[in-house]
Image: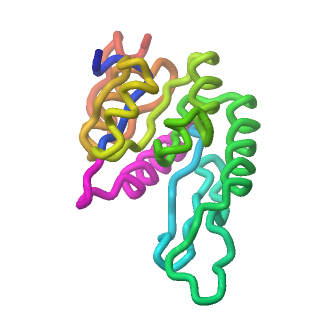
Amino acid sequence: MFHAQCDLAALVYGDHDNPDAVLRDFADALNAQGCRVVGMVQTGQCADSSLSAVLVHNGETLLLAQPPSPGATGCKLDVSRLQNAGTRVAEALAAGADLLIINRFGKRERDGKGLGFLIERARAADVPVIIAVSYDRFTDWTSFSGGVSAKLVCDRDALTAWWRSVSRHAPLPGADEHVTVCEAVK
């Protein structure tokens, strides 16, 4: 069941989309307005072994790729670095959050590993979650989420509309228009 007011949302992206830029821009806007957004957004590329993630709650960049082997092309995710990043996000989440952002839903999450535990913790704390999910992994995401999530196109407008439907305490990016009493109470 895909419902726009579900507090678990998949930002579904294709080959020509840039979910990292959309999520990073959104997190920066919310944090600038006083929200407490925690999580991580991918930076760098696997092709040049610079695969990393920025922690949106403090701006720190963490390398996620293993050191390149001599003669290797591309990179390989360092699972221990990913888990360390996940632990850092979990600590920030435990300190309180208005929103959790997770950079990708991948095969590790599909298999019950990776950063899936963060989604469970956020849901238990009643914190909305947004995660980037590729079109190729959307069927896996549907199984993982039990089919209960919002499905968003990969753009800022869709993300903002979703946030407005689930946010209870936080300011809204681009909220220059008049705020209604219902929105203020929400």
Instruction: From the viewer's perspective, tell me whether residue 59 is left or right of residue 6.
Output: right
At a point 74% along the width and 50% down the height, the residue shown is 84
Q: Position of residue 71 (x, y in %)?
A: 58, 89
**Residue at image x 62%, y 32%?**
118
Q: Is residue 55 above or below residue 158?
A: below
Q: Nearer the viewer, residue 84 or 95?
A: 84
Name of the residue lying farthest toward the bottom: 71
Is there any visible trace of residue 11 in the rendered image? yes
> In the drawing, does residue 45 fall left or right of residue 134?
right
Colour scheme in the image?
rainbow
Q: How many marks?
A: 0
Range of magenta residues? 13-35
From the viewer's side, name the closer residue of 48 and 166. 48
**Residue 61 seen in the current view:** no
Whole-percent x, y for residue 8 in the image: 43, 25
**Residue at the spot 57% in from the left edge and 16% down from the top edge:** 126
Is 123 in the magenta? no
The quarter of the picture where the N terminus appears is: top left
Left or right position of 185 against 87: left
**Which percent across, then down, holds residue 63?**
65, 66
Residue 119, x across and y down, in percent: 57, 29
